[in-house]
Image (spheres, rainbow, N blue to C red):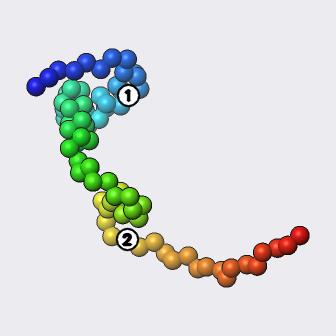
Amino acid sequence: MTNIIISNLDDEIKSRLQKRAEKNGRSLEEEAREILYITLTENNENSLNLATRIEQRFANFGDFELPEIAREPIRTVSIF
């Protein structure tokens, strides 16, 4: 395995990474490694279909239905 050094890491990013590591019971290095692993090994077959991408993004929320919004008839264009 190779070691890397990340220079000039923003203090806010480091703080957020540290909090995330603590929450997950990992060291800062382990958390950064896990983030890189997950990000770089996920399925790279990006769908160009926006509806599919939205569905994938919210899949973990479970089944729910949004109420249907009643539509009005198309209005005529005003001519001035």
Residue farthest to the left, as pictured:
1
Quadrant of the snapshot with the C terminus: bottom right
> Can residue 61 be seen here?
no
The residue singled out by tag 2 in the image is 64
- The residue nearer to you, when weighing 11 against 78, is 78
From the viewer's perspective, is residue 24 above or below residue 50?
above
| Residue at left offset 65%, top offset 80% | 72
Asked which quadrant contains residue 49, the reply is bottom left
Q: Secondary structure at mark 2?
A: loop
The residue singled out by tag 1 in the image is 13
Q: Residue 36: x and y, percent?
A: 24, 35
Residue farthest to the bottom, as pictured:
73
Asked which quadrant contains residue 14, the reply is top left
Q: Residue 74: x and y, percent?
A: 68, 79
Asked which quadrant contains residue 13, the reply is top left
Q: Residues within 10 Å of mark 2 (few under 14, many from 20)?
A: few
Is 38 left or right of 70, judged from the image as shown?
left
From the viewer's perspective, is residue 49 above or below residue 45?
below
